[in-house]
Amino acid sequence: MLMGVGGWTGRVVRRWLSERDATRAMASQNLNDNQRLWEAYAKRWPRRHSAIEDPALRAAGNGRLARVGDEWGVPADIDRIVGEFIRPFVAADSVVAEIGVGGGRIASRIARDCNRLYCFDISRRMLAHARRALKDHGNIEYVLLDQSRIDPAFTAFFDFVYAFDVFVHLDLHEMWKYFLAFRMMLKDGAKVFIHTTNLRADGGWDRFVRQAAYSVEGHYFISPEIVSILSERSGLRIVKASTNDATNFYLHRDYMAVLQKPAAATNIASDIISARRRPSSPGRTPRPDHAE
Ligand SMILES: C[S@@+](CC[C@H](N)C(=O)[O-])C[C@H]1O[C@@H](n2cnc3c(N)ncnc32)[C@H](O)[C@@H]1O
């Protein structure tokens, strides 16, 4: 393409192109790291997994682990988050999406409360685990993602979207992609629950200073102020937010927020929101490229 461009102009253009390509490659490094990490984790589970954090489950031994993820956290702490930040926004006729379903730890708590649950993940093996864990539910769809992007076939499709224990591993650019996706995939007035790190929480700060450098196995640290900026810039409004609470592991360490898409679509800069498509008709089932 640049064959005819020589001299100083050619050098400048070639340099610009290589910087642009480098920026694109860097932007997807976090995605690649996440994909490698979770594929490997799902492959070796249940032979190997991280330490079982719930003392009762630990005492009972590995045989009691029903799903990938049961080793993370204590059920009572998770039930409280689900009870305060997810279940109140899900009704029997809701079409719901989970971003980063993993082995179905949260989906198994929500599946029977909604009409349809779409489970998105970048890890094929995690989706296979989720499918096994949720096999008794007939209302689940599994969608393999190849990037942090939701097919526009899902425009204005969901009544509620949630992501638990996922954004703590995403860098800011990957998070921003999802904020834009939320705005696209939610129906007008619908809500999304997100869970991020929190430098303002006591437990979040402790974890930050214990981590020497960023790694995908560790956490990517942000604060509620950054969630506010991303919400504002994507045209979502924070309608519920967590406060620091030492009696719950996640509320002591992290930040939880419920964001709402405006009831009537407001104008938003065209450079951040991809072209809106016609709202879906009830009952339509999109056929995304990677439906499992
Ligand atoms: C720690 S697990 C949590 C799984 C589940 N939400 C739970 O709480 O048990 C993180 C999950 O997020 C998925 N994930 C990581 N990056 C993602 C991305 N950019 N888009 C969608 N899913 C992603 C991983 O493959 C993995 O299944």
Image (spheres, helix red, strand yellow):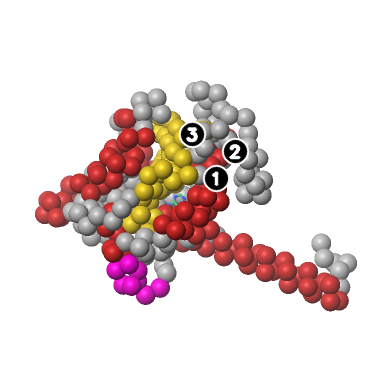
Q: Which residue is mark 2?
A: 266
- Vertical placement of 148 versus 265: above or below? below
> How far from the left and from the top, in percent, is residue 129?
34, 44
Q: Whole-Å distance between the Cαs marked 2 and 3?
A: 11 Å
Q: Where is residue 274? Give x, y as percent.
A: 63, 43
Q: Is residue 165 magenta?
A: no
Residue that badge 1 annotates: 235
Closest to the observer, 223 or 55: 223
Residue situated in front as seen by the camera: 61 or 273: 273
Element type at mark 1 = loop
Residue at figure coordinates x 53%, y 25% from the top left:
284
Res 211 → quadrant: bottom left
Q: Is residue 210 magenta-colored?
A: yes
* Residue highlighted by disc 3: 189
CB of mark 2 within 8 Å of CB of mark 3? no
Residue drawn at the location 37% of the way across and 44% of the way down: 240
Q: Nearer the viewer, residue 280 or 244?
A: 244
Mark 1 residue type: Gly
